[in-house]
Image (cartoon, grey):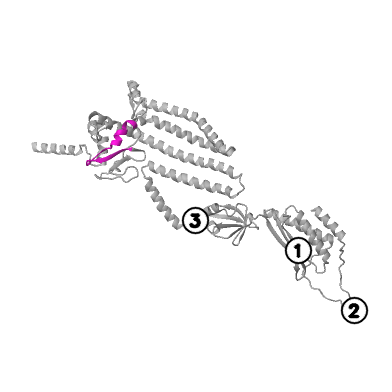
Amino acid sequence: MKKIILFCLLISTSIFAQKEVKVDLSNPNSTIYTHLYFLQSDSYEPEKAAKTIYGFEGKEAEEIAIKLKKILDGKGLKVDFSKVPTNKVYSDTTDYKIGQRYLLFPYIMPEVYVERIGGKWYYSSETTAKVNDLYKEVFPWYTEKIKQIIPEIGHQKFFTLELWQYLGLIILLVLSFLVFFIFKKIVYFILKKTQLWIIPKTNDKINTALKKLTRPIVLLVVIWFVKSYLPSLLLPLDLNTILFLSLNIMVTVFWIYVFLKLVKVIMSIYEEYVQTTDSKLDDQLVPILNNFLTGIVVFIGFLKLLTLFGIKPVTVIAGASIGGLAVALASQDTVKNLIGTVMIFLDKPFHIGDWIEAGTVVGTVETVGFRSTTVRAADTSVYQIPNSSLSEMVVNNKGLRAYRRYTTNLGLRYDTPPELIDAFVEGVRKIIKLHQNTRDDAFNVEFSGFGDSSLLILVNVYFVALDWNKEQSSKHSLHIAILKLAAEIGVDFAFPSTTLMIEQFPEKKGITLDYNIDSKRIQEIIDGIVKKE
C-alpha cells in the first residue's frame, strides 16, 4: 500500500513539474512568454521576468520589464504566440529590422523587439533605452497620481473594472463631446480659409463638400484625444485590446471618408477651374479623375484595414499584383482601352463638342469615358468607339479648323450674255465680302469653265463660324442672297437639258430670251441686294 501511495506522489510531482514554467531564453517565443508570464497576477515573479532584459540587473531590470508590459497593456497590444517564431536562429528579413531579431508589433511599435545575443534572446538595448520615453508617451503624467488620490471605495470592483475606472470612462466620454463641438467650428474655419486661398471663388457645392469633410476630421481629433488618455484608466489588457482595435478601425474608416470627401472637394475646385478654360475635354476629365482617385483611396484604406487584423500589407500587395496580372491578361481589351483613354487626354486630338471624322464615323464628340468615346452623327445616331481603336485612327478634327471652307459651282444658262455673267460674278463677290459670317479677305468667285449643260461659276468661301449648325445657317443666308441677285438681274440657272435646232425649218425661228444688259440698272440692283443682306 505504501508503494502505491509513493508511486501516486511521484506521478503527481512529475505532472506538476511538467507544468512548471521556467525561464527560457532560447528563442523569441520563449523569451517573450517568459517576460509576460512572470508578470501575470497569478504568476507574479518580476525577478524572473527581468531575466529577459539585457544589460541590466536587479531592481532596475525588474522596473524595465514591468514598464515594458504596462506599455503593451496600455496600448492594448496582445501578443499572439502562435505567430511568434520558435526558431533559435530566426532572422528578420523585413524592411524594419534586418538580422537575428523579432519585432513584436512592427507596424504599431517597431521600437520594441527581441534579438539574439550570445546564443540567447533578450529585449534589445534599443528597446530598454526607449522604455522610459515610450512609457511617458503612453501614460499621461497624472496616471500614477490618480491611483494615489482614489479613495478605497473607488477601488471596489464591479465585474472586471473598478468604480473609478467607470467614472473615468464617463468623464472621457463627456470631454470627447466637448472636443467635438469646439473643434467642429475651428476645423471648418481653417478649411474655408484654405479653400479661398487656393481658389477665391466658392459655391454651394464646395461649401457642402467642406462641411462634410469637417465632421470626419473632427472625429479623428476626438479619437486621438481618446487614445491619448485611455491608457491612464489602466484598463485590463483584453478590454484595451478590443477598445484600441475598435478605435484603430474607426480611425482608418474615418481617414478613408476624409480622403473621399477631400477628393470631392478637389474635384469641385477643379470643376470650377475647368469651366474657365476653353477646352471642353477638361470637363470630361472631372468624372474620370474622380473615379480614379476614389478607387485609389478605397484600395489603400482596405490594405490598412487588413494590417489591423495582423495581415502583412506586403502579402496583400503581392496577392493583388498577381490577381491584377491575371485580370489584365483576361481583359486585355479593357487595359488597351484604358491606355487609349490616357493617350487621348494627353494628346488631346479633339475636345468635347468637336466635329470629327474617324474612319467611317462622322459626328460630334459627346463624351470620353474610361473605355470608349461617344460620337453623335448628324442623323442623331450614337457611335461608341473603343478608345484603343480611336487612339490609333487617323482623326480629322474639323473642330480645330480656323475656318469652315465651302465650295460650290453655280450653273448659268449657256445663252447668258457675258455682260450679265460679269455682273452676276461681281454681285456675288460683294455679297460674300459684306456677309457677316464669311472672310472678306479670302474667297473666290470666277467663271471657271463650260459644263455639259451650264456655264460654271466657282464659288469658294470661308465661314468664320465653326459650329456645324451656324455653318448651315450661314450657307442658307448666302444662298438666298445669290438667288435674289440672280432673279433681280435676270440670270437663270441651268439644269440638264437638250436643245433641238429648228432654225432651218420654213418659217420657224428659235426662241431667243430677252436679256436686259443695261449696266446702270444692273449696278443699282446689285447695290440694292447687297444693302438688304
Residue 289 is situated, as x and y percent measured from the top left of the image, at 52, 47
- Secondary structure type for disc 2: loop
Horizontal placement of 254 versus 505: left or right?
left
Left or right: residue 245 compared with residue 25: right
Q: Is residue 218 above or below residue 513?
A: above
Label 3 CA crowd tier, 10 Å (few <14, some 14–19, many 20+): some
Q: Are marks 2 and 1 in contact (CB under 8 Å)?
A: no
> Looking at numbered disc 3 in the image, what kind of residue is underneath it?
Thr
Residue 374 location (% of width, % of height): 58, 55
* Sequence order check, earlier mark of 3 and 1: 3
Residue placed under numbered mark 3 in the picture = 334
* Residue 465 in view (yes/no): yes
Secondary structure beneath dot 1 equals strand
Q: Which segment did they paint magenta?
A: 111-133
Q: Residue at x 24, y 28 (%)?
A: 59
| Residue at image coords 42%, 31% | 225
Sequence-first disc among 3 and 2:
3
**On the image, which quarter does residue 420 sit in?**
bottom right
Circle 2 Cα neighbour tier, 10 Å, few/some/many (<14 / 14–19 / ≥20): few
Q: Which residue is mark 1?
A: 446
Q: Which disc, if any, is residue 455?
A: none
Q: Which residue is mark 2?
A: 506
Q: For residue 131: magenta?
A: yes
Magenta segment includes 508: no
Does the rendering let one see residue 45?
Answer: no
Give the number of marks. Answer: 3
Quarter-wise, where is residue 100 in the image?
Answer: top left
Is there a contact, CB below 8 Å, between mark 3 and mark 1?
no
Residue kind at label 1, given as amino acid type: Glu
Q: Name the element at disc 3.
A: helix
